[in-house]
Image (spheres, coloured by chain):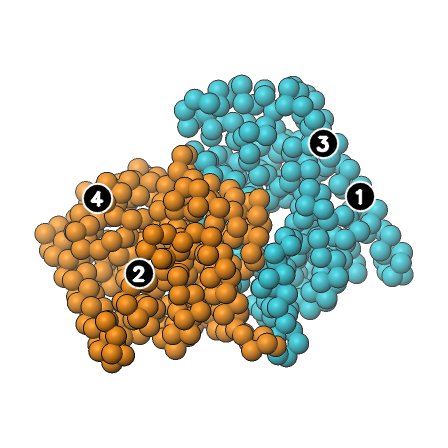
Chain colours: A cyan, B orange
């Protein structure tokens, strides 16, 4: 379940309780309160929450405080926390980002981080080293869910590979150093649910990567699209939905009980939807 | 001048004054104090400071508070503030990042932001819209200063263009909508000082872009390398040096007066160095 704080979309009862138009402490309180309820509802249902760091950062320092609050709440409830920050920079600075998100300590202590591959292999290595050292995970952008992902990621090189395929190769290579007991690597990939054909090819080229799949739900990807990011055994992908779960309620006037019910219902619908599509694919391919 | 906070490298007098091993308030104070001195020295000498957001973020919430302190100090001294954050995401989230850095208000109110083009044109558009609306600037990563920039940015497409050339084309196109009185666009580019040959070609393909040039100094780029990012009239580029200016002092035991002197001397050396190389190039090309 994705947590993308947008205070203007939150139910009135959250905004009212936090007196949101006033000081910055109220911004922090609104975001933290909203997420605490969502986390309480989804913790028994899903393995992880994905925090969209941009949406916290847009509220400045109070948003960043709320990021820490939400990370702590999610961990307290036993959820894995994916920091969707799409960070990167040259190696020495990439190390600072790794320290910010993956080293624990003073930074934002998430379990896994999304990163951009645009600066190349040396920019990814400090993150890989952090994953190895601190038991954290990485999701490298391979094929993003937006239409504009075609502009660079789909460009075809002289040797016939796309840029996405080059990055997938890099993910597979870098990931070989950090394979866990179950055969999956700590180095995963981001592949949008909105591009099922590409997903099939990319999945095959990095069999040990866990694929984080955005774009399901509000962005238009269906469960039937998303399942191409799973391996044949039905494992190896984490599908995310944000807005279609947390902002699924109809009217901003609803009270807390109804809000909880809308989050629960949307999450259960997603789980059923994905489970059914995985079963269908398994039947079609004669798999497990 | 680049401000990349690394508390462990700061002079003892800064760390002592802030009792750095204690609470998080001291982290904020050390970073803010160190930068306040640097800003005081360089404000009469240079037009802008570049804040490496990763280095603030590595200190968590107190680092983010220090980011706000440093932005405010730099603006108070009349410096332009470049937020080197290399952000981006799908369009709706890119807008949240634009709001975080370019809309003023609750976020981090910088004058210009570095962004990654990996997600394509639609991911850049919310930033371009913010530049137009709020009078801010953008620097899109075109060719970064690190060796690994070759891995994706130098890949050659079937039509003979490199990925960097494709991005440069995008910068030129997007920038056409936001040309200022002096003929330069609000949409600029990042091209590392470490790749002078590429810089010449890229400079020619986006004549209205202001080029932010990292990699001078500690990363090995020389003034003679960096000048290829300027137009023939000697304008159109901003060259950055971070570590070679702020951490140029020899011993951590120096006192404030000596520290100020080392920052001033390193800044003046850089200015002389760039001015001389620009003059040499102008003579060679028979230009102005």
Q: Residue B184's spot in the image, x, y percent?
A: 36, 57
Query: Which of the two discs, 2 and 4, labels the residue nearer the N terminus?
Result: 4
Query: Disc 2 versus disc 4: distance between alpha carbons?
Result: 19 Å
Q: What is the chain letter for disc 2?
A: B
The 10 Å Cα crowd at callout 1, few under 14, some 14 to 19, many 20 or more, is: some
Q: Which mark is residue B146?
A: none
Query: Which of the two discs, 3 and 1, labels the residue nearer the N terminus?
Result: 3
**B120 over A162 or under it: above or below:** above
Q: Which mark is residue A264?
A: 3
Residue at the outermost left position: B257
The 10 Å Cα crowd at callout 2, few under 14, some 14 to 19, many 20 or more, is: some
Tag 2 and tag 4 share a subunit: yes
Between disc 3 and disc 4, the foreground one is 4
- The residue tagged 4 is B77
Element carrying mark 2: strand
Q: What is the chain letter for disc 1?
A: A
Query: Disc 1 versus disc 4: distance between alpha carbons?
Result: 57 Å
Q: What is the chain letter for disc 3?
A: A
**B130 over B84 or under it: above or below:** above
Rendering quarter of residue A181: bottom right
- The residue tagged 2 is B238
**B160 over A20 or under it: above or below:** below
Query: Disc 3 versus disc 1: distance between alpha carbons?
Result: 14 Å
State the residue at coordinates (47%, 52%): B177
Q: Residue A25's spot in the image, x, y percent?
A: 42, 26
């Amino acid at each position: 379940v994705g947590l993308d704080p947008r205070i203007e979309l939150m139910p009135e009862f959250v905004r009212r309780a936090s007196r949101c138009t006033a000081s910055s402490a109220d911004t922090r309180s609104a975001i933290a309160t909203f997420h605490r309820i969502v986390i309480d509802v989804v913790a028994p249902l899903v393995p992880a929450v994905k925090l969209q760091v941009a949406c916290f950062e847009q509220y400045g320092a109070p948003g960043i405080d709320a990021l820490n609050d939400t990370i702590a709440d999610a961990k307290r409830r036993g959820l894995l926390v994916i920091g969707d920050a799409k960070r990167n920079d040259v190696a020495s600075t990439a190390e600072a980002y790794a320290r910010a998100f993956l080293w624990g300590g003073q930074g934002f202590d998430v379990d896994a981080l999304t990163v951009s591959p645009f600066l190349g292999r040396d920019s990814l290595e400090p993150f890989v080293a952090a994953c190895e050292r601190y038991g954290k995970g990485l999701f490298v952008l391979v094929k993003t869910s937006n239409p504009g992902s075609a502009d660079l990621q789909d460009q075809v090189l002289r040797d016939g590979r796309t840029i996405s395929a080059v990055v997938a190769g890099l993910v597979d290579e870098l990931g070989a150093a950090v394979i866990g007991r179950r055969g999956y690597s700590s180095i995963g990939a981001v592949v949008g649910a909105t591009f099922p054909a590409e997903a099939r090819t990319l999945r095959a080229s990095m069999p040990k990567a866990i694929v984080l799949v955005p774009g399901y739900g509000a962005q238009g990807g269906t469960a039937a699209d998303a399942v191409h990011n799973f391996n044949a055994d039905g494992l190896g992908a984490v599908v995310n939905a944000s807005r279609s779960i947390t902002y699924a309620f109809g009217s901003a006037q609803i009270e807390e009980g109804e809000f909880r019910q809308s989050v629960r219902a949307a999450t259960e619908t997603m789980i059923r939807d994905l489970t059914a599509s995985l079963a269908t694919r398994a039947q079609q391919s004669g798999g497990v």
